[in-house]
Amino acid sequence: MKKSLTTTEIARKAGVSQATVSRVLNGNSNVSIQKRTRVVKVIEKLQNKAKKFESTGEKRYIGIIMLYNSLDPQKYESITEALPEKFELLMLPRDISIDRMKGMFDSGKLSGVIFNGPSCDNHDLLEYLAERPHVWLNSHIESPNNMIFEGNEDAGRLAAQYLIKNDCKKLGAIGLKSYNPCSEIRIKSFLYEAFSSGIKADAFECNGHNSAFELLEDKEIEDDIANMIDRSDILHCDGIFCPDDRMTALFYRVLQKRNTQVYGNYKIISCNNDAEYLTGLFPRPATIDLAPGLTAKLALEHLIDQINGKQANDKIAIMVKAELIPGE
């Protein structure tokens, strides 16, 4: 039986580019209705296939609970490619009942659960899964059991060190409200590293809409950035850290609309190494690669170990080293 579709296969079946599939998976609004519909239909066919397997018992399943509507395409790709042949991925609703979850585990249909998101407010579900195979795909604010850390503290430190080594004397970080605590961790470690080196650094909050940036349209984020620039002195900094590549691309856009030249005026470093956002920027900023595909692969491997009875009760933190990708 064929495994879950990769983003490449989804793009081929939907007749769109892989970048378009990535935008749909990330909840990006810059996709036409026609293309988004084609991609969604392919994914729905995949989900319907998984539901059919669930009813017939032909497969064992690993469930994914999306705690917010965004899954890094590199993580999705890694999971589908590394998934053992006997398993099938099954998207589970975030409000799944304990009775349904228990029934799936008791029947042997469900072998483990992957959480994607920063927090789960279904405490009964968390309590039920405490003694059953499960992992988190990202840093989160629950208990640290089975948590995959992504080197966010290292990312902040690397960002500050990079700017300092490039002779930046006043550093700024763009703060953003996020579902994921990793952005806050990156900024805090960035500021700490700068202060420890005797360099002035500030965080400039960009949250005019008072909502997590994952839920905002690009235009809303762009407006927030413009408002932040108007009410702050971030452009007096010569080194700027954006904790997310999407934010970085929109920051460049705001500067270009204001005829503010980046080259020669600012050294900018971003985070996540997402070519979709960074390739078209000049000068291309440095970025920090947190290896999302590798963290997802390691998370899946740990989940399979739990399913097979290994390390079932251990607390685990899989550390993936953050890597600096120099800019222009």
Image (cartoon, rainbow, N blue to C red):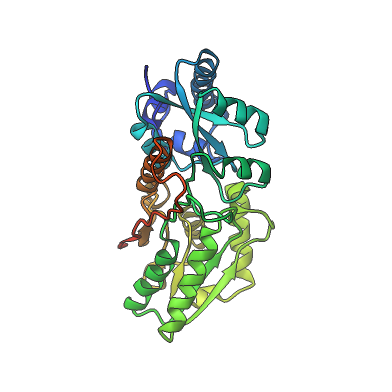
Picture quarter with the N terminus: top left
* Left or right for 284, reference 191: left
**Residue 284's x, y, as percent?**
35, 58
Q: Is residue 287 above or below residue 106?
A: below
The C terminus is located in which quarter?
A: bottom left
Q: List the single residue furthest toward the bottom.
A: 198
Residue 77 seen anywhere in this rendered image of the structure: yes
Q: Quadrant of residue 222?
A: bottom right
**Foreground residue, 20 or 73?**
73
Q: Residue at x 62, y 70 (%)?
A: 230
How many labels, in total?
A: 0
Q: Camera-side residue: 207 or 281?
A: 207
Query: Residue 50, image x and y in percent?
Result: 50, 21
Q: Is residue 285 left or right of residue 106?
A: left
**Quarter of the rendering containing residue 60:** top left
Q: Position of residue 178 (x, y in %)?
A: 59, 56
Q: Is residue 270 above or below residue 102?
A: below
- Residue at the spot 41% in from the left edge and 71% down from the top edge: 266
Q: What is the x, y in percent for residue 268?
A: 41, 66
Residue 158 against residue 6 in the figure, above or below: below
| 266 or 155, nearer to the observer | 155
Tell me the residue at 43%/53% (across/down).
Answer: 316
Q: Is residue 257 visible?
A: no
Name the residue located 42 percent from the left edge and 55 percent from the top edge: 317
